[in-house]
Amino acid sequence: MRSDGQAGREKIDSAMTKKEKQSRSLSEEAYDRLESMIVSTELLPGARYTIQQLQQQSGLGRTPVHDAVKRLSSNQLIHVSPRSGLRVAPVNLAQERTLLPLRTEMEVIGCGLASERATPQDHMILRTFIADMEASKADLSLERFNFTDRLLNKAILTASGEPLLANTLIPLQTLYRRTGWIFHTYLGPSASMETMIESHISLLRLIVSGDRARTEKFVREMMVDLGEMLLQVRQSIDPATLDVSLAEMSVRTGIAGPIA
């Protein structure tokens, strides 16, 4: 027989566990919302925000937003300074070009392993992505594609059977996804979106086929295209779009004003 004290402790433990789960769920939701706002530049690159402003924009409370900011900071999406507060990381094209070879090798490993290790359940998931993307590719919005791409990347990493890859690769994918958003918003015609979607469908078909060599070769080709996209963004996008703080710079060229 359990004592009243034992039963009481079990109720408290159960309530605490339920509360912890709810807190984690809200923290995950806050992270997902804020990450999406960073990727879509709704939270402007290089702009400063307070926790209160992030609460208002996410519609969530202080604790889950604070938890999300800690994760976003560890993933280099938000910079936290004791003196100047929170700043959304600017788009750092030099960093992304430097890290591209690292991302390439990790994507090759992840997709290659997925082609070999994918279980029947993984195949069902990947085939569903293929079918849904095929059915909606003509009118898939950039926002919807980014959401799908995030889920798709997780599905591939799960199929790879190497969970440690996710710790480094998912934050990298998020950084490049934001640059992709800027490219397709300012430079990329609708045809480039369709090409990108077709490319992802082709990758999934190769993974499902189990041909590791062809899968890895195709991933490398996709990463070359990504490098070309970074170059176009560097050449054609106003730097103040990549870091809004640059808009405040005062540059004297000597063309106008007094000659001293």
Image (cartoon, rainbow, N blue to C red):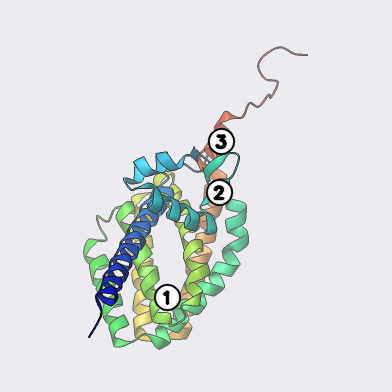
Image: 178 above or below 154: above
Q: Which mark is residue 245?
A: 3
Mark 3 or mark 2: name the one nearer the start of the chain. 2
Image: 249 above or below 23: above
For the residues bearing labels 3 and 2, Cβ distance under 8 angstroms: no
Check disc 2 and give the amino acid type.
His
What is the secondary structure assignment of the residue under circle 2?
Answer: strand
Image: 160 above or below 175: below
Query: Picture coordinates of residue 128 (x, y %)?
Result: 25, 74
What is the secondary structure assignment of the residue under circle 3?
Answer: helix
Quarter assignment of residue 14: bottom left
Mark 3 or mark 1: name the one nearer the start of the chain. 1
What is the secondary structure assignment of the residue under circle 1?
Answer: helix
Position of residue 48 in the picture relative to residue 55 (left or right): right
Q: Which mark is residue 79?
A: 2
Q: Which mark is residue 157?
A: 1
Check disc 3 and give the amino acid type.
Ser
Residue 6 appearing in the image: yes
Q: Which of these two is toward me, 26 or 105?
A: 26
Mark 1 or mark 2: name the one nearer the start of the chain. 2
Check disc 1 and give the amino acid type.
Leu
Residue 149 appearing in the image: no
Query: Picture coordinates of residue 58 (x, y %)?
Result: 34, 46
Report the mark closest to the observer, 1 or 2: 2
Count residues near mark 2 (Cα–Cα under 10 Å), then give few for <14, some for 14-19, many for 20+: many
Residue ID at (58%, 51%): 93
Query: Picture coordinates of residue 222 (x, y %)?
Result: 47, 67
Quarter assignment of residue 157: bottom left
